[in-house]
Image (cartoon, rainbow, N blue to C red):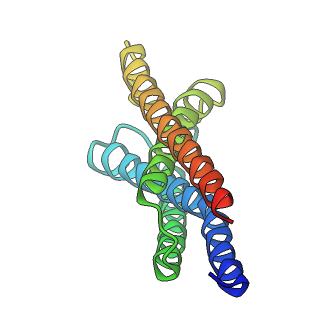
């Protein structure tokens, strides 16, 4: 193998490693957007359990839902644009991307369930006497998603390190 080939192979590997962060970011954005969209569609529109902002009139609640819906779509579309770019470049790592999706979805749901529901109190999951069962289910599911996503991301990070070490041994 000539030195020029070595440089080309090494730069291709470096380029691939460069996009691992984008795989994660794309998954995170898509996961946040997806779970926000599901929350908005199911709990806001279909079940009418709450609005994004419930401390005012129904009209304000509907307007806040519109902004929340726009946010979820911007996040989803941003994640998909990054996904398409990664695929076009041949740098898509679906396992890492899925870890990001789970991490983004769970992270947003946990943020929503703890910060927005309990600390800021801008809305509750459902307005009933025993809201705590809803809170527990919501936050436990979010924690499971975060843990699964974190585990997948850690596993892909380990695999990346071993691939990187193996590629350096070849040169």
Q: Nearer the viewer, residue 169 or 148?
A: 169
Q: Residue at x 60, y 54 (%)?
A: 166
Residue 127's place in the image compared with 51, above or below, is: above
Q: Quadrant of residue 22?
A: bottom right
Residue 56's place in the image compared with 64, above or below, is: above
Where is residue 42? Give x, y as percent: 31, 47
Where is residue 65? Give x, y as percent: 48, 55
Q: Nearer the viewer, residue 29 or 57?
A: 29
Q: Nearer the viewer, residue 140 or 94?
A: 94
From this viewpoint, which residue is outermost toward the left?
A: 46
Q: Residue at x 62, y 69 (%)?
A: 13
Where is residue 103? Give x, y as percent: 51, 42
Residue 63's place in the image compared with 7, above or below, is: above
Q: Is residue 57 visible in the rendered structure shown here?
A: no
Considering the image in quadrants, where does the N terminus appear? Answer: bottom right
Where is residue 116? Give x, y as percent: 59, 34
Q: Is residue 93 visible in the rendered structure shown here?
A: yes
From this viewpoint, which residue is outermost toward the front?
A: 1
From the viewer's perspective, tell me whether residue 68 is left or right of residue 41: right
Q: Residue at x 49, y 34 (%)?
A: 151
Q: Quadrant of residue 82?
A: bottom right
From the viewer's perspective, tell me whether residue 50 is left or right of residue 75: left
Residue 162's place in the image compared with 117, above or below, is: below
Considering the image in quadrants, where does the C terminus appear? Answer: bottom right
Q: Quadrant of residue 17?
A: bottom right
Total marks drawn? 0
């Amino acid at each position: 193998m000539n030195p020029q080939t070595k440089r080309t192979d090494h730069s291709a590997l470096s380029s691939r490693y460069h996009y691992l962060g984008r795989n994660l970011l794309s998954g995170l954005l898509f996961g946040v957007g997806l779970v926000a969209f599901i929350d908005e569609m199911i709990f806001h529109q279909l079940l009418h359990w709450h609005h994004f902002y419930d401390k005012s009139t129904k009209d304000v609640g509907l307007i806040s839902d519109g902004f929340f819906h726009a946010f979820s779509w911007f996040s989803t579309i941003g994640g998909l644009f990054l996904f398409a770019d990664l695929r076009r470049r041949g740098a898509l790592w679906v396992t890492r991307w899925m870890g990001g999706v789970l991490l983004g979805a769970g992270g947003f749901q946990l943020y929503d369930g703890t910060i927005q529901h309990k600390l800021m109190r801008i809305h509750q999951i459902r307005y009933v006497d025993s809201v705590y069962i809803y809170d527990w289910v919501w936050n436990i599911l979010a924690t499971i998603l975060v843990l699964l996503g974190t585990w997948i991301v850690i596993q892909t990070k380990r695999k990346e390190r071993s691939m990187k070490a193996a590629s350096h041994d070849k040169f």
